[in-house]
Image (spheres, rainbow, N blue to C red):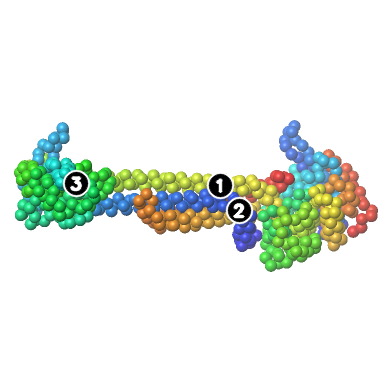
Amino acid sequence: MSPLDLVAAAVRSLRGNLTQSILTTLMVLIGVGSVITLVAVGNGTTAQVNAQVASLGASAIYVNPATDDQGSISTPLTRADRDSLASDPLGTAIGLVAPIVYGNSTASAGSVSASPQIMGTTPDFFSITNAKLSAGRFFTTSDALTNQSVAVIDEGLQMALLPDGSSAVGQTIIVADTPTLVIGVLAPTAIDAMYGMASGGTAYEPIDHVEAIITGYNDLGSIALSATSPDTVDAAESQAAAILAARGEPTPYFSSSDELRETLGGTQESLSNLLSSVAAISLLVGGIGVTNVMLLTVRERTREIGIRKALGAQPISLAGQFVLEATGLSIIGGALGVAGALIATLFPVTGVMPIVDVPTIGLAAGISIAIGIFFGTYPAVKAARMNPVAALRVGA
Amino acid sequence: MTVRDTAITLRAVRREYGKGESMVSALDGVDLVVPSGEYLAVVGPSGAGKSSLLNILGCLDQPSSGSLEIGGRLVSDLPEKKVASIRNTEIGFVFQSFNLIPSLTALANVELPMVYAGVGRIERQNRAQAALGQVGLRGRERHRSNQLSGGQQQRVAVARAIVNRPTFILADEPTGNLDSHATEDVLTIFDELHGGGATVIVITHEDEVAARAQRVIVMRDGRIERSYRNEKVTS
């Protein structure tokens, strides 16, 4: 039997047993399609999380004061610490440094009031945290120097003070009994998107102003600093710790966007692994389905196998035909699965834009062909070894 | 009689099923020589061993002991690959239940033995069409089995049996599922094939079918009980 005749026989059989052929194709299609789609959703989620974390400032580090066993601040941070971090020649990996003080106060706009967190800092803070505005501008050094009561607020505070959704930029609000001009509104950050905004929102004001009207000229709440690049975050942390240690300070607590990325990345990886596992299981189920359908086909076509053997079919021809049929169905199912997945991944899934990667397509398509050959072989061998007398007796 | 003149030779063929006390002897030392060009009928009651004999003659089963020669070649103990080749080129089967492959057209069914023999597509189609014409089915090439009557299906099966020009045609109750008209059609085709020099072996329990053969062997309890010639039938 020539290879061409073998292919023709397989095609004819598949057409003659259309229902089984469609069912088998469908199983492989779903298996391959779900692998590509789920992995693409995982990729999309990863990319989205990475983009959100990057938006926080890839190299932002927060230096928080050391605490004792009870969690109380044991050694507060000071402006002198801030100056050392900014100027010490040891801090080669340290870029910008911004002191931060935290206060709480009421803020009101007309009859509406809120209880935001007040954060006093310098304009560098916005650069360090890679903050983005949804409206207006950041405050500048000149705003700080003129002691002008200005504030940049987040969207949480804007919503709290102006529930009608109007913009707060250009409006004067009262913060700690001081009329304060809102000059900018921050766009939500990845943390806001991930965990929701702090209730009551946050107002960012020049540090001197906040110290003058709310906190007093005391210790710093924390210090924000940037590494010179995302690759030097660890180096910048070590240098900051060394500089502070040289000043006799205990090791402070560092937090960085890297940690957030690692935490989110870990969660993301688990999610991706989960999706991949589900996808792999669906492919396996597809494979078992192919075997099942092929075994059923062999059983249903036992008489046909007997007839073919009586007419002189060689065992290898029969086996080849069944393997070809299974492989053909797997290739068709795999191709349709790839096509279906490529179409499905053009649309966002629960807000995530799936990202298809070529190796996954190759892997899924390769596995679908392998499934055809592997799971098609057993029924094929079974068919080829069948006793013609017994096979012809079936259904007689 | 030379080897070339002999289509089939069975020597002391036994076929047993099962072991020990449950062993059943289906063929109990059968000796049979079928000359080339003979029209032979095998008759006998149920359980006489007709089907077992057919399976051995058709190389669908192996004898427990004894030997089978087809066209002078010893078939017993050959590997399955060689036996499959003998089934393909030396034997043309006609079954009681036609045994056409329902998903294939009449033409494709007739082409099938040639596919396994490695005959090229064009030659296959020409020979298959000629065979279908020989059994009176010209114009039915594209019909599937469910679009044909029982008699027509059996004629397709006969066309399939003769298309590879086998050493002999082996028919198992070929008219068992046919009405009298279709029976006559099929038996006429066998007469014509025999008239053209073909060796035909028909297993039957119908006297009118056996009456068409040159020689009749009667089987009982796995043995050939007797053999006689139908004097009116000439080769």
**Marks 1 and 3, the one that precedes in the sequence:** 3
**A339 or B36: nearer the eye?**
A339
Please determine if labels 1 and 2 lie on a single subunit. Answer: yes
Which quarter of the figure is the C terminus of chain A placed in?
A: top right
- Residue A75 placement (x, y as % from top left): 9, 39
Q: Amino acid at mark 3?
A: Leu
Q: In the image, what residue occupies the spot 78% across and 61% down?
A: B137
Q: Amino acid at mark 2?
A: Leu
Q: In the image, what residue occupies the spot 81% across and 40% down?
A: B47
Name the element at disc 2: helix
Q: In the image, what residue occupies the spot 5% across and 42% down?
A: A216
User: Which residue in the protein does label 3 denote?
Assistant: A161
User: Which residue in the protein does label 1 denote?
Assistant: A291
**Marks 3 and 2, the one that precedes in the sequence:** 2
Q: Nearer the viewer, mark 3 or mark 2?
A: 3
Q: Amino acid at mark 1?
A: Thr
Chain at tag 3: A
Please determine if labels 1 and 3 lie on a single subunit. Answer: yes
Which quarter of the figure has residue A245?
top left
**Marks 1 and 2, the one that precedes in the sequence:** 2
Q: Nearer the viewer, mark 1 or mark 2?
A: 2
User: Which residue in the protein does label 2 denote?
Assistant: A18
**A270 or A100: nearer the eye?**
A100
Which quarter of the figure is the N terminus of chain A placed in?
A: bottom right
Q: Are marks 3 and 2 in contact (CB under 8 Å)?
A: no
Q: In the image, what residue occupies the spot 62% across and 52% down?
A: A17
- Residue B92 placement (x, y as % from top left): 77, 56
- Residue A290 placement (x, y as % from top left): 55, 48
Chain at tag 1: A
Chain at tag 2: A
